[in-house]
Image (tube, rainbow, N blue to C red):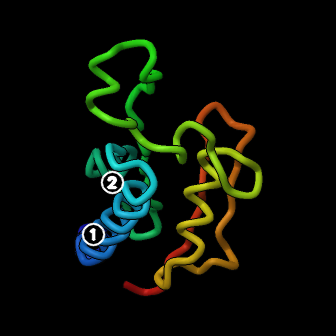
Amino acid sequence: IRTFAIRVEAETERRLGARMVAVSKVQAAATSLWPRAVCKVFGSIATGLSVPSSDVDVVVCLPKVMSTEAAPALARAGVMEGRHLMKGGGASGTLQATLAHVLSLAEWIQSDSLKTIENTAVPVITLPTKPL
């Protein structure tokens, strides 16, 4: 059992770098659409309880949007996230679809396997990657 645990831990550690590269690439895709977007890792990777077959759970956090008419200071700051955040986009017009579309164009994504799951409490994009 101890040998098995050591092997699992070593393999998990070996994959961590590629997983963090993937998170950085999702962050870059999100900020290309919404400059103030922040990606946060959660789940088993964040808690250190992952195994080699674990997926990477990432939440894309977007800042609260206010209209520039609501506060003069916002008008001076400029458009918070541009038309992408205000109108959504993508095939179904959702923010999730917009990000999924951008990710589907990335070379490191297996775009034929990318899926969005929108009818959940938290919208999900599953995106298998090519070897990083």
Q: Quadrant of the C terminus?
A: bottom left
Alpha carbon separation for disc pair 1 and 2:
8 Å
On screen, residue 108 above or below 115: below
The reply to whether the C-beta atoms of the residues labelled 1 and 2 are less than 8 Å apart is yes
Q: Nearer the viewer, residue 98 or 73?
A: 73
What quarter of the picture does the N terminus occupy? bottom left
Q: Amino acid at mark 2?
A: Ile
Give above or below for 69 relative to 52: above
x, y (%) of residue 50?
Answer: 36, 57
Q: In the visual, does 58 lie left or right of 99?
A: left
Residue 30 in view (yes/no): yes
Q: Secondary structure at mark 2?
A: helix
Position of residue 47 in the picture relative to residue 53 (left or right): left
Residue at 33% across, 35% down: 78
Residue lying at 46% horizontally and 82% vertically, measured from the top left: 108
* Residue 40 visible (yes or no): no
Q: Residues within 10 Å of mark 2 (few under 14, many from 20)?
A: some
The label on residue 16 is: 1
- Which residue is at 46% across, 68% downward? 53
> Residue 112 location in percent, x, y?
69, 79
Mark 1 secondary-structure assignment: helix
The amino acid at mark 1 is: Leu
Mark closest to the chain's N terminus, 1 or 2: 1
Using residue 81 as the reference point, say whether residue 119 is left or right of it.
Answer: right
- Name the spot of residue 34 as percent of width and height, x first: 41, 48
Q: Position of residue 105 (x, y in %)?
A: 57, 77
Residue drawn at x 75%, y 38% as measured from the top left: 119
The quarter holding residue 15 reads bottom left
As drawn, the label of residue 45 is 2
